[in-house]
Image: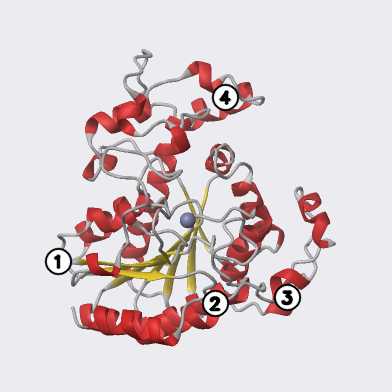
Amino acid sequence: MNHIILTHSDLLTTLADELPSNKQRQSLVQGLLNAYKLDELCEVLPIIPIQDASMGQYHDKDFINQLQQPRDDVDKQLDSYEKVRMAVSEEFEGCNDTEEETVGDDEKFGLSFDCYPFPFMRYYVNLIAASTIQLAKRVVNSCKEGGIPGQIIGINWYGGRHHCHRSRCSGFCYINDVVLGISTIRKMCSGGVFYLDLDLHNGDGVAEAFKFSKKVTTCSVHRHDVGFFPAGSGKLEDSVSGMYNVPTRRGLTNEVMQWILQNIVFQLIDKHQPQYLVVQLGCDGLSSDPNNEWNMTIEGYADVVHLLIEYVDIPVIVLGGGGYNHTEVAKCWTYVTGTLLGYKAADFDEIPDHRLLDNYEHDGYRFWTDSNLQPGKMKNENTLENLLSLQAHLLSL
Ligand SMILES: [Zn+2]
């Protein structure tokens, strides 16, 4: 039986619901986990505000300062402003808050375009960083303490903000919790960390952070094409030993993803012999995702996680990430959590009554529908020939 450590914070759920790219998504995720009572079977790790300099272990001070500026005008745009303000002041009581509003050059730090400031952003950033840092600490300490039977798996569906750079927001990512979490593990133990990024988009921010690290290996499996976000990154030829890009074409199926794991990723894991595995499980590769690029299913994502966990026999941390069909994301991450706890597909059939049940009306209040049980009709452009050439190159590095 796996020992699952699951992060949770009501306040972060509220704040993450305002993320411009994923409005209300976090509530759906937390709501569904709770509706199936999965949280009751996990060790729930509450997320508490960061009061130390741990964001500075990767990000530049000026950037952190810019993120932490009070922005009352933006905060007040929120309908539930007063309620959130009270919740925030209660939870952040005693934390140093910058009093004066001295907002500098947002654009310089990427706080524009797809990463514009949103209500209560500074608290969101703090708690997102906290979520993966605190989970990393808890997982490492659990391993050190010993006495826990089974494999230790940490899950943080708030995290996985893999595009953020050292001093610039990017791709809906305002802070790089992944880098902060991995750095936390590295400070606490001498072994290596293997980071596997399965989001549709290249995990550029994490790869860049650890490009020269001997102890952190990054491997990103992503959709790649000229101009595809993050443009200019993630090319096969840019791979080096310890930083691997697995660029794929449209229509990637569950079977192709499994092939990549079994014929490329496992070999790389064997080569680097990590002590911890961190997986970013953005699910914007679902066939139902509006990106419409990959053709994976919920079952496919769960199979991938199970294959990995069975293969590695080391502690694993699973993070969220992209995913823009929000009810399907909630189902996918709930299903992954549930199957790690021993649930079967049939256990999910009817969605239990809960506060957000109405969001599933279009599915007839069912977890499984004709469209999420099967992949879509998209053509798989990833030929065996293409996959074999990726394999030959990456395994030769
Ligand atoms: Zn993505």
Residue at 54% x, 62% y is: 283
Residue located at (45% from left, 34% from top): 113
The amino acid marked with disc number 3 is Asp
Task: State yes or no: discs 2 and 4 in contact (Cβ < 8 Å).
Answer: no
State the SS at label 1.
loop
| Marks 1,4: beta carbons within 8 A | no
Work out whether mark 2 precedes mark 4 in sequence or the reverse, and give the earlier one.
4
Q: Nearer the viewer, mark 2 or mark 4?
A: 2
Q: Quadrant of residue 71?
A: top left
Label 1 vs 2, first from the N-terminus: 1
Q: CB atoms at circles 1 and 2 under 8 Å apart?
A: no
- The residue identified by callout 4 is 86
**Mark positioned earlier in the residue sequence (3 or 2):** 3
On the image, the x and y values in percent for residue 80 come to 65, 26
Q: Which residue is mark 3?
A: 347
Dividing the picture into quadrants, the one containing residue 106 is top left
x 64%, y 47%: residue: 27
Instruction: Name the amino acid type tagged 4.
Output: Met
Asked if residue 392 lies left or right of residue 347, the reply is left
Which residue does the numbered mark 1 point to in the structure image?
Answer: 214
